[in-house]
Image (cartoon, rainbow, N blue to C red):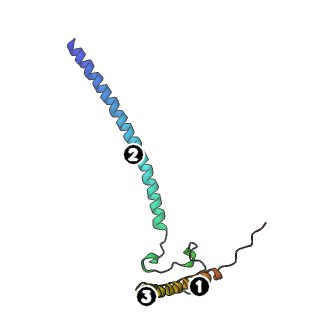
Amino acid sequence: MLKSIAQDAARTALEEQSAAHQEVVAKMAADNGELAEKLETVTKRLETVENTPAAPKVFTNGQVPPAEQLRGQDQGRANGQVDVAKALERKREMYAAPDAGAQNEIAKGLQGDAIAALQAIHASRPAPAPLRA
């Protein structure tokens, strides 16, 4: 009788452990399926990025990408580029100026150059269509 009680208790414990183990295995299979889907999605996105041509050296040395790759900020830009070296030199002059009056004059000159560049950009764009009432 004691032997059958021990066997029943061991069998019950093994069945409970087996059921818990089967649940864990089923959850692992579901998690693996989700991970496989995510991996497939990431792989497709990586292929898209790999197959998209990069504009060469645009952000490394200040070159401008070809006009067909511009996204709006530089389209229709005037034919002359901003002289960055000149602007930096004038900025250094402004910070080294002996008094506020000289700094203000240099700042006004820089602002005038910026306004002229913006006007040149706007002048090279076609006029927008008039609004209809």
Q: Is residue 3 visible?
A: yes
User: Residue 116: which numbered mark, if any?
Assistant: 1
Residue 43 drawn at (x, y percent): 44, 58
Which mark is drawn over residue 93? 3
Q: Position of residue 14 (x, y in %)?
A: 28, 26
Q: Is residue 85 above or below residue 34?
A: below
The answer to whether 118 appears left or right of 35 in the picture is right
Q: Are marks 1 and 3 in contact (CB under 8 Å)?
A: no
Mark 1 / mark 2, whichever is N-terminal: 2
What residue sits right under mark 2 in the picture?
A: 32
**Horizontally, is 83 left or right of 26 in the view?**
right
Query: What's the CA distance linking mark 1 and mark 3?
Result: 21 Å
Q: Residue at x 47, y 65 (%)?
A: 49
Residue at the outermost left position? 2
> Where is residue 89, by image quadrant?
bottom left
Disc 2 secondary structure class: helix
| Quarter of the picture holding the C terminus | bottom right
Q: Amino acid at mark 1?
A: Ala
